[in-house]
Image (spheres, rainbow, N blue to C red):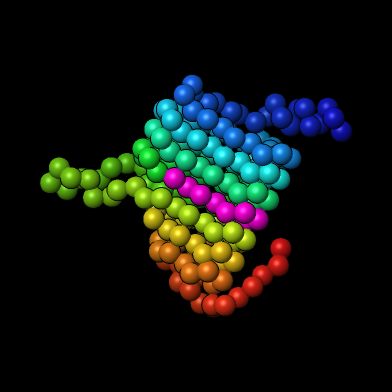
Amino acid sequence: MNSFRWIDYLRNKIRIASGNRVTIGKALKMSKTSIKIKGKGNHLIIGERVKLRSSNIEIFADNALVSIGAGTMIGHHCHISVLDHERRIVIGEECGLSRHVKVMCSDGHPICQNGKQINEARDIVLGDHIWIGDSVTILKGVRIGSGSVIGINATVTRSIPEASIAVGNPAKVVKENITWQP
């Protein structure tokens, strides 16, 4: 078993440019995950008991933050991306992100009109105890309240209140005052 864990550790791809910080809590489980941090003054915080499975975390900016709360599980082929300066993605505690989830606080490229950028990046905040279904995309400026569930294939373009179920493209709240068990 020890040799498997060592081999699994070697399969992670971690590249962190100097001038950046990474804080890792106890009992991190990470397999086949890619972490790339370029720029300076960035901070990646991974809480205790976090599980990262075949996922990608990228910060290509300056003074950006990605924070993953304690007890959170990030499923296979998830992509968490900060490409603009001074932006942040905060994922609360005890969250579950299923497979192929994308969390992006920008559009990836600036779009300008009359010389002014019209698609500014914005922070994303996911509360505690959130369940994100397979193939969900969470876009810039979204806040998802604690205790919420986002259904499979949803595209979240607006904030979702706590204890709600949201589904569809764009995601719409279909139930409120819900609870769920992992």
Question: In the displayed structure, would residue 31 be above or below residue 153?
Answer: above
Residue that appears at 45% across and 52% down? 124
Q: In the figure, is residue 100 to the left or right of 106?
A: right
Q: Residue 165: x, y in percent?
A: 55, 71
Could you say which quadrant of the image residue 22 lies in?
A: top right
Residue that appears at 44% across and 45% down? 88
Residue furthest right as drawn: 1
Residue that appears at 59% across and 28% down? 14
The answer to whether residue 66 shows anywhere in this view is: yes
Q: Residue 47: x, y in percent?
A: 63, 44
Toward the viewer: 76 or 96? 96
Q: Which residues are magenta?
A: 88-96
- The quadrant of the rendering that contains the C terminus is bottom right
Q: Residue 129: x, y in percent?
A: 62, 61
- The quadrant of the rendering that contains the N terminus is top right
Residue that appears at 40% across and 61% down? 157
Question: In the displayed structure, would residue 101 be above or below residue 86?
Answer: below
The answer to whether residue 151 shows anywhere in this view is: no
Toward the viewer: 14 or 89? 89
